[in-house]
Image (cartoon, rainbow, N blue to C red):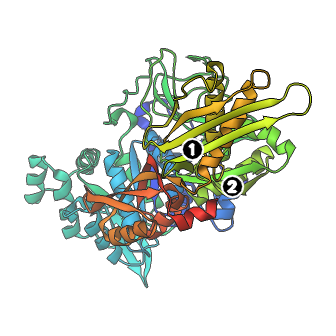
Amino acid sequence: MSDRTAPPPPPVEDPGRLRNVVLVGAPGSGKTALAEALALAAGAITRAGSVPDGSTVSDHEAIEHQQQRSVQLAVLPLAWRGHKINLIDTPGYADFAGERRAGMRAAEAAVLVVSATEPVGPTVLALWRECRAAGLPTAIALTRVHGPEAVTACQQAFGEGHPDTVLPLFLPGFRDGRLTGSVELLTGRGYGDAPEPDRAARGALVEAIAGEDDTLLERWVAGEELEPDALTAALRRELRQNTVHPLLCTAAPLGATELLDLVVDAFPSPAERTDGLPAPDPDAPVLAQVVHTGEDQYVGRLSLVRVFTGTLRPDTPLGGERVTAITSPFGHHQRPVPQALPGDLVCLARLGTARTGDTLSADGAALDRWPQPEPLLPTAVEAHSKADEDRLAQSLARLTAQDPALRVEQNPDTHQLVLWCTGEAHQAVVLDRLRTRYGVQVDAVAYRVALRETFAAPGTGHGRHVKQSGGHGQYAICDLTVEPLPGGGVEFVDHVVGGAVPRNFVPSVEKGVRGQLAKGVLAGYPVVDVRVTLTDGKAHSVDSSDAAFQAAAALALREAAADGSVRLLEPVAEVRVLLPDEYQGAVLSDLSARRGHVLGTEPGGPGLSLLRAEVPELELAHYPVDLRSLSHGTGTFSRSYVRHAPMPAALAAQYR
């Protein structure tokens, strides 16, 4: 255990004293630094680490140190005022949105971390909308605050026309552009070098949190001094209903204690969850869900589990899974615990088959999975050596069990092994884990798209396969006509009259035709959408054979293609792009440059546009990265195969 890590907090005996809080924010907003400050303030660590030197509790993988960003969620259990706070630090980078959504499933509330040194841009607004869509009560933590201007900017950005719903819960104090302390407006509690209370600011807060409590509002208007407990209860009610969003300023270490107090006083417990998931009854059958799967060098697979109902113990039956030991995670450290109450987050080692998103229960009950980002960036790989090849399949199976955002495909058309990732950062993590965790080295190779061939005009071919080398020879002649058959697949027609090709050899001709079509007649790609008609031929009573007629049919097909009537077809996908309105022009221009045909645009929500276009798949291999660049990380897209379409002649020449 790290020499910075303090002894573990005492266990809580009541789910009402649990708080599960997810930290959400854009890349570089300061989430991990805030998590360090909170852990230090709670006494969970003896000194704060930093992201640049790779010493934070949350970021413990070497790849996180190399990329200088979180690539997976981390849980930091903190003890504060008799409560246990499971702080869930999630990645900000879009490639790891699945980890963020897992953290949101495990939490009852969110803290949106916003850097005061950056404008509140589309990336932050997209995260805000995601928290709202998930129904999570959300507070806002401003980091790197140097003055009050950022508070106003957040109120305008997140208030959605009602800036009074985003309210500073603490009045910050500044000196020479530095945060020096704050005073809680509801209770008057001071932190650091606290400023003088502001009655006007307090009044605005009281009026907002009073909500429909007319009695509380009347007492305030009448000048009565309101009890802190009554005000805190009102704040808790309004926050749970998502009608008020507290905002506080932080500049580590300032602001950490205030946030911990806010979490305990106003954030909902598991018993107050409102999204329809089961209530946390300690005596009910255990129902839990795997929210993250990692790997420990000593114990192997390690599953982070959120318990929803029941009390989880080492002997708890969970269907086909066997629970041997329960630990409480703290970054990458594991601390043994005797049990887990409903609402808590714990780790289970060596589960047999459970993967991220799976439900653990004894009675077969199942929880819905949270939506995963669709992996749309293809990376074709080959094992570096025979030894790597022997271990590659098993290693990829272990990786996909841990990472639901990774999809592995053995493409039947191109015969490539393709790793589908969510972006270049995710791709780097996958390749790094293959190398460092499993000792498997792979080489990235050019990704190939499954092209097709077809006949653009009718053609005829004469196939003559005649060989004599002593003994039985080989004799088969057949004449074929090939016609385009748009959308009709491959059709074989026997039109021989007079028995020129004996009936028992017609299936041989068809077999030869289909075999050659599968191999291609121009550039080695399968031929589709053609009708092949056997019109004539000759046989020998002794030398004709099944193999001979197969060979003759293949020769006839190749001759039919020799007149240049064969064209290459490329797959076309329908692409649906969801992005902020301000980036619509740039993305539409980019789609046109990719030979895309825009089908239409429509509203995709407040401030959002949904674009639909048909785009050749050859142009989409790098699109996840390019769209992210064009939309500053805010655009998402989906794709679905539509058809194969003729490839432009100049481009087709490159693939022949």
Q: Quadrant of residue 255?
A: bottom left
Near mark 2 (Cα within 10 A), the count class, few <14, some 14-19 or many ≥20, is: some
User: Which mark is drawn over residue 4?
Assistant: 2
Residue in the image at 72% along x and 53% along y: 432
Q: Separation of disc 1 and disc 2 at Cα?
A: 65 Å
Residue shown at the point (38%, 78%) measured from the top left:
147
Q: Quadrant of residue 295?
A: top right
Query: Could you tell me which residue is drawn at 51 percent across and 16 percent down?
Result: 362
Residue located 34% across and 65% down the image = 183
| Number of marks | 2
Depth check: 489 or 507 in front? 507
Whole-percent x, y for residue 405 in the image? 55, 45
Q: Is residue 142 toward the left or the right of residue 222 in the image?
A: right
Seen in the picture, residue 53 relative to 315 is either above or below; the reply is below
Judging depth in this view, the residue of 298 and 200 nearest the camera is: 298
Who is closer to the viewer here, 140 or 374? Answer: 374
Q: Are marks 1 and 2 in contact (CB under 8 Å)?
A: no
Q: Which residue is mark 1?
A: 527
Residue with the most extreme right position: 470
| Label 1 SS | loop
Which tag, 1 or 2, sits closer to the chain's start? 2
Mark number, residue 420: none
Tell which tag, 1 or 2, sits nearer the viewer: 1
SS for tag 2? loop
- Residue 485 appears in the picture as rendered: yes
> Can you give x and y, in whole percent of width and height, for residue 654 in the image?
62, 64
- Residue 6: x and y, percent? 65, 49
Quadrant assignment for the C terminus: bottom right
Amino acid on which disc 1 is placed: Val
Q: At label 2, which amino acid type do we have?
A: Arg
Q: Is residue 631 visible?
A: no
Query: Picture coordinates of residue 160 (x, y %)?
Result: 23, 62
